[in-house]
């Protein structure tokens, strides 16, 4: 039978008493009251060369000519049907079709500059829906730039960075 010193017995007794219900050795979660999380509504703002701004919600974008495209993306193995408006139509509507380049910024501040050759050479869809449902942030929406998978893979001008999700702003690069 093993022998324990009085010191070892005292340490063991202290640990057992500390581990009793209601006593914690480590600080764990403590109760807190949280305010409700509210996500900013989705919108895409166009900033014109003179600084004028036009804001589009997904519903407002869908008031323009809409298209659909069945494709995959680098983040989707299976094809999906994306629905929305063409980037070049939106730019043309606001007299921006002939600008040299645009800067697209996402909600998370990811920013890409897109030369005119990109949207003239490829049919970029600004998707607001996937498979008929509103596009969610969880699925890289609610406003996502989509390009046909085969066109993207074979493009001389477009690359993965142009497929902006959570798109929030388009600004003319002067």
Image: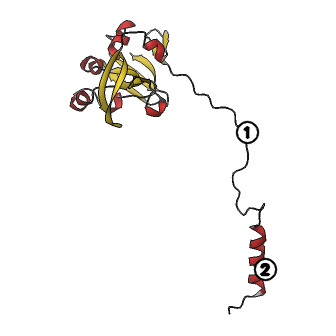
Res 113 visible: no
Residue 105, x across and y down, in percent: 44, 25
- From the viewer's perspective, is 168 left or right of 10? left
Q: Which residue is mark 1?
A: 33
95 left or right, relative to 15: left
Q: Quadrant of residue 24?
A: bottom right
How many numbered discs sit on the rendered protein? Answer: 2
Mark seen at residue 143: none
Q: Is residue 28 left or right of residue 13?
A: left
* Residue visible at 70% across and 37% down in the picture: 34
The picture quadrant where one finds residue 156 is top left
Packing grade of label 1 (10 A; few <14, some 14-19, many >=20) is few
From the viewer's side, name the closer residue of 149 and 22.
22
Q: Position of residue 76 (x, y in %)?
A: 35, 36
Task: Please give the name of the residue rendered at 27% of the width and 30% of the height, measured from the top-left corner.
Answer: 149
For the question of whether residue 84 can be seen, the reply is yes
Q: Residue at x 36, y 10 (%)?
A: 65
Q: Quadrant of the N terminus?
A: bottom right
| Image quadrant where one finds the C terminus | top left
For numbered disc 2, what is the local secondary structure? helix
Badge 1 marks a residue whose secondary structure is loop
Q: What is the x, y in percent for residue 169? A: 46, 20
- CB under 8 Å between callouts 1 and 2? no
Residue count near mark 2 (Cα–Cα under 10 Å), binned few <14, some 14–19, many ≥20: few
Disc 1 from disc 2: Cα separation: 40 Å
As drawn, the label of residue 10 is 2
The part of the image, by quadrant, that contains residue 122 is top left
Figure check: 4 above or below 104: below
């Amino acid at each position: 039978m093993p022998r324990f010193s009085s010191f070892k017995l005292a340490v063991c007794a202290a640990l057992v008493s500390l581990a009793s219900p209601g006593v914690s050795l480590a600080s764990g979660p403590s109760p807190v009251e949280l305010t409700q999380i509210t996500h900013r509504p989705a919108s895409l703002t166009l900033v014109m060369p003179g600084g004028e701004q036009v804001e589009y919600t997904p519903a407002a974008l869908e008031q323009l000519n809409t298209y659909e495209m069945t494709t995959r993306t680098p983040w989707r193995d299976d094809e999906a049907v994306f629905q929305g408006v063409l980037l070049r139509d939106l730019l043309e509507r606001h007299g921006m079709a002939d600008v040299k380049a645009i800067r697209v910024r996402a909600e998370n501040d990811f920013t890409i500059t897109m030369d005119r050759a990109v949207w003239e050479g490829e049919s970029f869809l600004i998707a607001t829906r996937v498979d008929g449902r509103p596009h969610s942030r969880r699925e890289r929406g609610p406003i996502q730039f989509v390009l046909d998978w085969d066109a993207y893979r074979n493009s001389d001008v477009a690359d993965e960075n142009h497929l902006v999700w959570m798109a929030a702003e388009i600004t003319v690069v002067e």
